[in-house]
Amino acid sequence: MKKDQVQHLPVMLDRCVALLTPALENRDEAVVVDATIGLGGHAEALLERFPNIRLIGIDRDQSALERSKERLSQFSSRVNFFHAVYDQIPTLLSEMGIQGVAGILFDLGVSSLQLDDLERGFSYSKAAPLDMRMDKSKSVTASSVINEYSQEELTRIIKVYGEERFANRIAKNIVKARGTRKLENTAQIAEIVKDSIPAPARRMGGNPAKRTFQAIRIEVNQELEILKRAIPQAINCIELHGRMVVMSFQSLEDRIVKQAFAEVTKSQSPVGLPIELKEHKAKFKLVFNGSETPDEFELSRNPRSQSVRLRAIERIAI
Ligand SMILES: C[S@@+](CC[C@H](N)C(=O)[O-])C[C@H]1O[C@@H](n2cnc3c(N)ncnc32)[C@H](O)[C@@H]1O
């Protein structure tokens, strides 16, 4: 195993493979979409375990795709890579002439590759340029959000996407600071956030910049808007007995997934109808109730797994 593979352990790997297994085993062929292929850890395990699958690997980050292509080179005849946003899954599948897929995996959020590359500005621990784009070809960066958004917009983003109590003060202080000079790096933002949060609140819940950075990242990459349309679209692409597994890393993402799953696993029967007609029956079931979290063993060796919530559904009717 190469050094980077040791450092970047795929989150809840065995569980993801186990959850997809009933949809993939004992059949001649099956298509799996890895909507967030990243460094290819989950994809590699699936390709190794199921010689019958074709995997469609998607990532909006060109450098992640290059890394996963290299890692999965031995499986190249069974993998198609796409530099795309995961709300393009239906389009990509129809362009390939694929009607339905047996498995879809979403491992949301940022990869270790993105976090570890200081130049990309995802980390608040060291000074780095205000970037945070997952797709470096896009024009909106953390710098444009920080330096160009109005105080009201900044407040809303930090409050809603960061679930930050002191969003008002942080936004006000960002606007004040940028009045004298353009804000250039992540350390300046971390400092402004720290100074905006009263000392007693600062002592709780880890680095105070975490929530504001999360908020800016979500805005730069339009993460929640994309996820809201992508999950229902992807669900529609699942064939009978196919499964979808989603891992979220913060509550806003998890809420979107939970709501989308709730919608398709409930009966569509109009209120008051005495019996449930076949066409109103739910087309999906939850593979288990609620969400799962990693066990102690994984938590102790894989820091990225700390905040994960895993959910899964299966199609039970067409
Ligand atoms: C947590 S990593 C995936 C890690 C991967 N499962 C592995 O084993 O290496 C998430 C990846 O999803 C990508 N990503 C995030 N949002 C995306 C979107 N809307 N469309 C496509 N890719 C996205 C990121 O660029 C990142 O590479």
Image: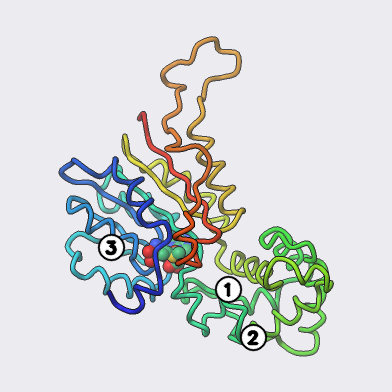
Q: Is residue 269 left or right of residue 98?
A: right
Residue 136 image offset from top left, x and y in percent: 47, 76
Residue 263 image offset from top left, x and y in percent: 53, 35
Please identify, in this view, whether the residue under mark 2 or under mark 3 is nearer the observer.
Answer: 3
Residue bearing the label numbered 3: 44
Residue most extreme to the bottom: 181
Secondary structure under tag 1 reads loop
Mark 3 Cβ and ligand 1 under 8 Å apart: yes
The mark that comes first in sequence, 2 or 3, is 3
Residue 235 image offset from top left, x and y in percent: 42, 42
Q: Is residue 41 left or right of residue 301?
A: left
What number is the disc on residue 14? Answer: none
Please identify, in this view, whether the residue under mark 1 or under mark 3 is nearer the observer.
Answer: 3
Residue 14 image offset from top left, x and y in percent: 35, 54
Residue bearing the label numbered 1: 140
Residue pictured at 30% horizontal, 57% vertical: 56
Residue bearing the label numbered 2: 185
The mark that comes first in sequence, 2 or 1, is 1
User: Marks 2 and 3, Cα distance to the nearest angstrom?
Assistant: 36 Å
Asked where in the image residue 39 lies, by quadrant, the reply is bottom left
Asked where in the image residue 162 lies, by quadrant, the reply is bottom right
Residue pictured at 28% horizontal, 59% vertical: 45
Q: Amino acid at mark 2?
A: Asn
Mark 2, other Cα within 10 Å: few <14 / some 14–19 / many ≥20:
some
Secondary structure under tag 3 reads helix
- Vertical comparison of 118 with 150: above or below: below
The N terminus sits in image quarter: bottom left
Please identify, in this view, whether the residue under mark 2 or under mark 1 is nearer the observer.
Answer: 2
Indicate which quadrant contains ligand 1.
bottom left
Q: Amino acid at mark 1?
A: Val
Q: Nearer the viewer, residue 126 or 158?
A: 126
